[in-house]
Structure formats: C-alpha cells, structure tokens
Image (cartoon, rainbow, N blue to C red):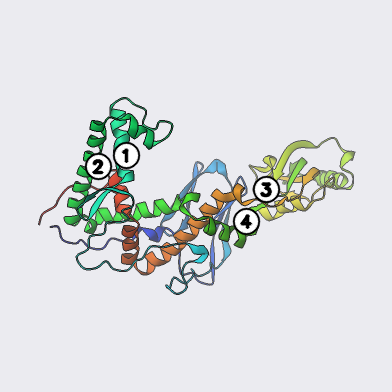
Amino acid sequence: MAGKVERMRPFYRLLFVVLLVPLARADTVVLTDGTTMTGQVISENSQEVVIETLPGMRTELSRSNVRVIKRDTPQAARPAPPSLSPASGAPYGIVLPSGDPFPPGTIPQGPLDNLVARVGPGGVTRRDYERELRNQALSKGMAAAPEGGYAILEQKLTAADRKAALQRAIDEELMFQAALADGVLDQEWARKRINSEYFYSVSNAEAPAFTDQQIEAWYRANPQEFMAPVSVKIKYMNFPTETDEGGFGRKQFREAQADPTSTADWQDDGWVAQGQIPRCMMDQAANPEDVAALFKTEKGKVSPIIHGGVYTFVFWVVDKTESAGLRPLDQVKERVARDLAAEKLKLLNAIGESDPERYYRMALREGIHRRLRAYRKIKFTFQTD
C-alpha cells in the first residue's frame, strides 16, 4: 500500500486573506461599468491589465474594460472572520461539516444517501445508478433525459438494460473502494483535486444549496444590498478638458445649468441606473463618487460639472425614477445564494488557513471524493512500495 506523501500547500490560500493590518494601501481598478477591483496591479499593457485581488488570485482584464487605475489608494481593514467555535456556530445558519479526525482505521466514504446497492463500506446511490441509466439509454440511441425524468427512463429500458446499468455502477464502486483501500486519499494529487473541487462546489452553489431559512436570514440582515436603484434619463454636453480655450465650455455649462432649454447642444444618452456609468463616459476616467452626484440631481435640473478625464461633462436629468424600495425575496434569491456562498468560502478559508488537515477532512465528509469519482477524476490505479 502506498505510504502517505508530504502535506501539500493548501490551495485555499488563494481565496481570502484572514489577517490584515488596520490600514493597508492597494491599487484600485475602475471598470467601464463602474465596478471596482482592489488589490495589486501586477502588470499592464495596451491589451490587458492583471490584478492580484488576493494572495495568489490573479484576474486578467481586457484593457478595453478598464477605465482607470488608481495607484496606492488607502483601504480600510477587512473585518476579522467570525468565530468558528462550536459554541458560536456559523452565522445565518450556514452549515459546515465536521472537521474532527476520523476514527482509527476508518476510510472516509462521504454521504451515502438513497442507496440502491451496498458495496463493502460504500455503495451505489440512486444518483450513481441514474447516471448509468442515462449512459445505457444513450448507448441505445434513446433520449437521455425524457420528459418525466429518470423514472420514465427506467420504465423505457428493458430489465436487461437496467441490470447492466446497475452492474456498471457496482463495478465503478468496487474500483473506487479498491482505490480508497490502497490509500488514494493520501496521494498529493488527490488531495489537490479534492480541495479544488470543494472550493468550486461552494463558490458555484445555487439557491437549492441553502435552506429557505438561511436565504431569508441573509436577505433580512442585508437589505441595502437588494434595493431597487434610482434611475435617471439623461442628456449630456461635454468639452475637451485640456483645450477649453477662454473657458467657453464652462461658460456654456453654467448657462445650461441656469436654463437647460437655452441650448440645443444636448445629446441623448438614455436611462442609467445608480451604480452604473453613463454610456457617454464609458471610455473616460471619471471618479464614481463624482458620478454619484448625477443620481442626486432632481428631475428637470442639471447636474454639477463632472470631470471624466479627457472630457468634462454636465447632464440634464429629463426624467427620474426613485428607488422602489426593497426588492421581493423571490426576485433576488439567486443573488442571496451567491452572497451566502461567498460567506461560506470566508468561513472555510479561515479554517483552511489555521488547520489545513481539518479543511481536508471537511471536504471528505462532504463526499467531494465521490463527486470526483463520478467524473472519473479519481484515478483507479494502484501503487506499490
């Protein structure tokens, strides 16, 4: 049986920073849609900008999507992660698997729900069996997902086909159990795949991954995140910032602010929602805080002068819709799920930073190694000393 290998460097160091100094400085990249990314700009050229938002986590941005890079800006400290002691539990009812050591001699199996066949310490779940039913249907030229789901598919297959599907699922499980007995979970490549898959499964979690109670708790605790934004319908005028000879452009702006109907130089720019950047400023380096003044401008009035970099702008708010208040939960359920997944990642990273072995045991209790087996990412090869 293969011996244990040296502990791998945990991948989750890429996810979140746990300990921070009270006040740090970083680069801020403002995108053309008004959103920002904070971290260290690693490189930039005419084609792309690479920013490291967290240690080891780099994002490549197309230069055309970057409006401005603000260097060495002060950043407020991030709050410390919540306590993970068993007494306090995770917030909002987020459920984390136990990271306690397995009993001596135990080979982790993961959840074994809805078993259709027991195979040694493991077994074939209904999900495993349905996967092989699908493969059997495909081999027969049948639709793999007929209306009515797997129950209908099972009825359409013959008894011999169903038996063949179950036997393949059992054979897969036998190979999986043999790999577990051979120490595959101690292999460095297996640990890396399992940890990576655990991160992926949490970061891509959808609403069904969380209970209605968890989703509503987060929604009620963070109402500011789910408010319908203020929107304005605008017209604009601009002039080149550096070549405003004699201040003609500024004079025209002041006249327009006093009476917007006094000039025909306005250009339509349509509707824009709070948090976004007007289309006419997409290629400019406007400060989002300056643009925010646009949404405070009353209907029929003209905004303060907004500097966009190459051009300077002023906007006439010809129509405006105020915030409609808190959006109904059913409209933002998937967004809440993404927020909860991000919160769960923070909790997991706190564990991974302090106790990598515990993190790995949590992944095994979630049955991540079984998911990899299902996608044939666990190699059924045996190593001997």
Crowd tier of the residue under label 1, counting other residues whose Cα lies within 10 Å: few below 14, some 14–19, many 20 or above? some
CA gap, disc 1 to disc 2? 8 Å
Mark 3 / mark 4, whichever is N-terminal: 4
**Residue at image x 39%, y 66%?**
351
Mark 4 / mark 2, whichever is N-terminal: 2
**Residue at image x 21%, y 39%?**
167
Q: Amino acid at mark 3?
A: Gly
**Residue situated in front as seen by the camera: 97 or 270:** 97
> Which residue is identified by label 1?
131
Q: Is label 3 or label 4 in front?
A: 4
**Residue situated in front as seen by the camera: 357 or 118:** 118
Mark 3 / mark 1, whichever is N-terminal: 1
Asked if 166 appears above or below 110 in the picture, the reply is above
Q: Amino acid at mark 4?
A: Glu
Q: Is label 3 in a helix, a strand or a loop?
A: loop
> Which residue is identified by label 4?
225
**Residue situated in front as seen by the camera: 294 or 26:** 294
Q: Where residue 209 appears, x then y in whole percent?
A: 46, 52
Mark 1 / mark 2, whichever is N-terminal: 1
Mark 2 / mark 3, whichever is N-terminal: 2
Q: Is label 3 or label 1 in front?
A: 1
Asked if 15 appears above or below 332 in the picture, the reply is below
Disc number placed over residue 142 in the picture, else none: none
Q: Where residue 74 appears, x then y in whole percent?
A: 58, 65
Q: Is label 4 in a helix, a strand or a loop?
A: helix
Crowd tier of the residue under label 3, counting other residues whose Cα lies within 10 Å: few below 14, some 14–19, many 20 or above? some
Disc number placed over residue 169 in the picture, else none: 2
CA gap, disc 2 to disc 3? 63 Å
Residue most extreme to the bottom: 87
Residue most extreme to the left: 385
Q: Are marks 1 and 2 in contact (CB under 8 Å)?
A: yes
Q: Amino acid at mark 2?
A: Ala
